């Protein structure tokens, strides 16, 4: 029975694929041929002679019966085909609805994650704001005193042995590191309103690179097209943004590499996107959503405020900052800032 069922299913599938006219012709031909063969066989076996009237009746009767069956089966096949089309359309609509639902779920999930990250960032900034003023000023005073004392000792002890000079240098570096942390802390929670000016992006980046110590093992490639529209931003704040990003890029390549800095004008709104790509070890996908959160860091002896400052200062100047990274293939930070359309080239 299983073989017959399979054969019947295959036959039905093949019949559904052929046109109605071809099915009718094939069915009538088959019915007439079979009827003729049966009538000829019976007539010959009956009396050994062929009867023309009987042959005609044997052809006409199955032809009429077959015509009736063709009309019936054709209508049935038509309804089956329409039902199959309706089911296929329903399945396609269901797939489209499922895809649309999946896309909406992913979009809402991403929005919730972004909202959650933003809430965490604001809460962290609020906590920092409560302690930044008091702690920052209280610590800067003794740090300034210690820095002056180190400078005085280095001045009055020019002939000191190398060990003393080494320890004085260590103290000086640690004071500078502590002062840098305090600056990041104050900048993260107490951003002044920007004072926009016409800023040439090429000149700004060149000044920052000249002032930033670049390891010998790191190559910097600066690609600023000419002409490129100038920026309408606070120069001091944007200097700090790029300085932090360049410092992070250098630290991401301890064994050396290439830092590629490019600027691209966005024609629709006149803004400019500056990308910074390092060839370092990259950032894992688990860490990427947390990068701009205050107090989040993967580095030793850091409190995780550098990128928080980058985001806050960029947004204060009407821009945005994003990052793309693949573990083992480096990272790219994109900073988009408003361009001075009227003043640009």
Image (tube, rainbow, N blue to C red):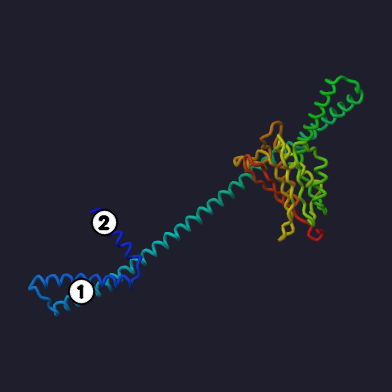
Q: Which residue is mark 1?
A: 62
Q: In this orientation, does residue 12 appear?
A: yes
Can you say whether 34 is above or below 291 in the image? below
Q: Secondary structure at mark 1?
A: helix
Residue 318 can be seen in this image:
no
- Looking at the rendered image, the quarter that the N terminus falls into is bottom left
Label 1 or label 2, whichever comes before in sequence order: 2
Q: Nearer the viewer, mark 1 or mark 2?
A: 1
Q: Between residues 226 and 325, which one lies in front from this camera angle?
A: 226
* Horizontal relation, residue 163 to residue 22: left or right: right
Q: Nearer the viewer, residue 26 or 163?
A: 26
Q: Which quadrant of the view contains residue 67?
A: bottom left
Instruction: Tell whether 55 sits left or right of 160.
Output: left
Examine the rendered structure and indicate whether residue 63 appears above or below residue 168.
below
Where does the image place residue 285, in percent across and percent down from the top left? 60, 42
Q: Which residue is located at x 32 percent, y 71 percent?
A: 22
User: Which element carries disc 2, helix, strand or loop?
Assistant: helix
Residue that mark 2 sits on? 5
Place of residue 97 in the rendered image (x, y in percent of width and height, measured from the top left)? 48, 58
């Amino acid at each position: 029975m299983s073989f017959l069922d399979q054969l019947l299913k295959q036959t039905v599938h093949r019949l559904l694929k052929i046109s109605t006219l071809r099915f009718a012709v094939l069915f009538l031909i088959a019915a007439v041929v079979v009827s003729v063969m049966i009538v000829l066989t019976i007539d010959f076996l009956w009396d050994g002679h062929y009867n023309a009237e009987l042959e005609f009746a044997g052809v006409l009767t199955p032809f009429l019966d077959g015509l009736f069956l063709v009309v019936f089966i054709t209508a049935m096949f038509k309804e089956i085909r329409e039902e199959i089309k309706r089911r296929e359309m329903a399945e396609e609509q269901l797939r489209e609805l499922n895809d649309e639902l999946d896309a909406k779920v992913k979009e809402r999930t991403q929005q919730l994650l972004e909202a959650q990250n933003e809430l965490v960032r604001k809460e962290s900034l609020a906590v920092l704001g409560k302690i930044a003023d008091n702690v920052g000023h209280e610590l800067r005073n003794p740090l300034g005193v210690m820095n002056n004392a180190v400078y005085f000792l280095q001045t009055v002890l020019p002939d000191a042995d190398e060990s003393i000079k080494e320890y004085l240098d260590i103290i000086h570096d640690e004071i500078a590191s502590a002062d840098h942390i305090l600056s990041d802390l104050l900048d993260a929670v107490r951003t002044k309103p920007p004072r926009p000016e016409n800023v040439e992006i090429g000149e700004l980046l060149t000044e920052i690179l000249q002032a930033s110590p670049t390891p010998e093992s790191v190559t910097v490639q600066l690609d600023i097209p000419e002409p490129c529209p100038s920026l309408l931003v606070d120069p001091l704040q944007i200097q700090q943004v790029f300085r932090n990003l360049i410092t992070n890029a250098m630290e991401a390549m301890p064994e050396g590499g290439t830092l590629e800095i490019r600027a691209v004008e966005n024609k629709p709104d006149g803004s400019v996107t500056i990308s910074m790509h390092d060839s370092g070890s990259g950032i894992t996908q688990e860490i990427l959503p947390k990068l701009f959160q205050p107090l989040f860091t993967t580095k030793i002896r850091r409190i995780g405020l550098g990128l928080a400052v980058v985001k806050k200062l960029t947004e204060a100047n009407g821009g945005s900052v994003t990052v793309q990274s693949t573990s083992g293939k480096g990272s790219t930070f994109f900073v988009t800032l408003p361009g001075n359309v009227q003043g640009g080239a």
